[in-house]
Amino acid sequence: DTAVSQTPKYLVTQMGNDKSIKCEQNLGHDTMYWYKQDSKKFLKIMFSYNNKELIINETVPNRFSPKSPDKAHLNLHINSLELGDSAVYFCASSQGTAPFYNEQFFGPGTRLTVL
Amino acid sequence: LAKTTQPISMDSYEGQEVNITCSHNNIATNDYITWYQQFPSQGPRFIIQGYKTKVTNEVASLFIPADRKSSTLSLPRVSLSDTAVYYCLVGDSSDTGNQFYFGTGTSLTVIP
C-alpha cells in the first residue's frame, strides 16, 4: 500500500488557470507538508499543517493555499498560475504535531508545467 | 536569512567511505539535524537524524560537533545504488522565529 500518494502525477496547464493537487496519507500521521522543488533541485518548504496549526513559509505567494478536509488529506490549491510555478511539488507527512521533528514520508511528486 | 550549505557534488569509487558536510551556522537550539536521500523522479527518503555527538544506524552515521554549526553524513562502503542527492534539514533561529530549511543538496555519484 502506498503510504503517501499524490494526484495527478503530471499536470500541464495554461498561465492564469487555477489548479489543485491532491495528497493523501494512510499512515495515521498528524502533520502534513507541501514542498516545491525547482529545476535546480532546491527543496523549498511551503507549508506544514496539523489539526491545530498552519505554518506558512512567508515567501510563498498567497495564490497558494492548502486545504485539509480531514487528517489524512492535504490538498494544494493554486490560483492564477504563473510560469514560475512550474516545478515538482511534493507532499509529505510525519507523526506528531511538532513539524519537522520526526521522520517525514514523502509522496512521489507532481510535476506541474505552466505554459 | 542564514542558509544551510552543502557541496554541490561529490564523486566516489565503490567501496569507499563518503562524508558529506552541511553547514548550518544559525541552527535553532532545540532543533534536530535530519538527512534525506533522493533518487531521480522520487520523493526524498529519511536516512538519519541526530541532535549532537554521533548517531549511527544500519545505513549511515551522523557526526555533529559540540557547537552544532555543521554536521557530517557518513556513508560507509558506498555502492552504485547510493548514487543520489543528499539533503540536510535543520531549523534556523532568527529574529522572526524559527524556519526550517533543506540544504542545497549534494549530488553523489558512485563510480564503479
Image (cartoon, rainbow, N blue to C red):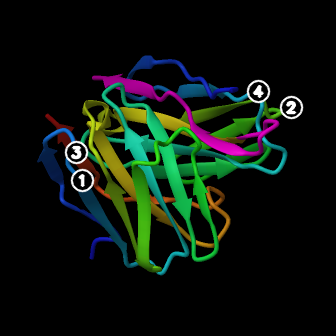
Bounds of the magenta span?
B92-112
Instruction: Please tell me if label 3 and label 1 are on a single chain.
Output: yes
Identify the residue at image location x=70%, y=29%: B24
Q: Nearer the viewer, mark 4 or mark 3?
A: 3
According to the picture, the residue beneath numbered tag 2 turns out to be B67
**What amino acid is labelled 4 in the image?**
Asn
Distance between mark 3 and mark 1 Cα atoms:
15 Å
Instruction: Please tell me if label 1 and label 4 are on a single chain.
Output: no
According to the picture, the residue beneath numbered tag 3 turns out to be A111
Distance between mark 2 and mark 4 Cα atoms:
9 Å
**Which of the labelled discs sits on residue B25, or is there none?**
4
Q: Secondary structure at mark 4?
A: loop
Is disc 4 surrounded by few (<14), some (14 to 19) or many (20+) residues within 10 Å?
some
* Residue contact between numbered discs 3 and 1, judged by CB atoms under 8 Å: no
* Residue contact between numbered discs 3 and 2, judged by CB atoms under 8 Å: no
**Magenta stretch holds residue A79:** no
